[in-house]
Image (spheres, rainbow, N blue to C red):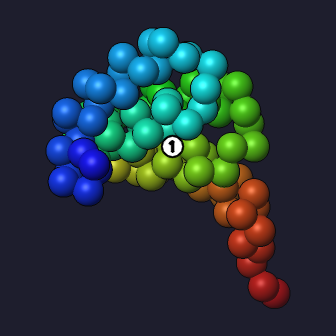
Amino acid sequence: MFFDAKEYTTAARILDGLVEEVPEQTGPRLLLARAYYHSAQLRRAETQLRTIVERDPVEHYARLMLGRTLERQGRDDEAAPHLRMAAVLAGDFPQD
């Protein structure tokens, strides 16, 4: 609902409470990271995404979002390994 309306800050407030209640669940934390990303709260998005990747190193979407979040902050060198890993996890191999 809040994502459809592009009310990302409101979504982040609600999702933050949910993540506090169920910190072990990946889904709410990913949504919170997306809300932070879309509302330009990039450091907060990065924190949530790093937590997910630490817990589940093969979580494709978290890797992709972390790479994009780092790119958006101008941290391309840090972003590159996460984006490569996301591509590999998605099966996007370069064709020779």
Disc 1, SS: helix
Question: Which amino acid type corresponds to the residue marked 1 in the rendered image?
Answer: Leu
In the rendering, at what x and y percent does residue 42 appear? 32, 36
Query: Residue at 60% across / 32% down in the picture?
Result: 26
Residue lying furthest front in this view? 1
Query: Residue at 50% across / 38% down in the picture?
Result: 30
In the rendering, at what x and y percent does residue 12 appear? 29, 31
Locate residue 86 relative to residue 7 in the image: left or right: right
Residue 82 visible? The answer is no
Q: Quadrant of residue 41?
A: top left
Dot 1 corresponds to which residue?
66
Locate residue 54 relative to residue 47 in the image: left or right: right
Q: Is residue 59 above or below residue 28?
A: below
Q: Is residue 78 above or below residue 4?
A: above
Locate residue 65 relative to residue 7 in the image: left or right: right
Tally of marks: 1
Residue lying furthest bottom in this view? 96
Q: Between 95 and 47, which is closer to the camera in this rendering?
A: 47
Q: Between 79 and 49, which is closer to the camera in this rendering?
A: 49
Q: Residues within 10 Å of mark 1 (few under 14, many from 20)?
A: many
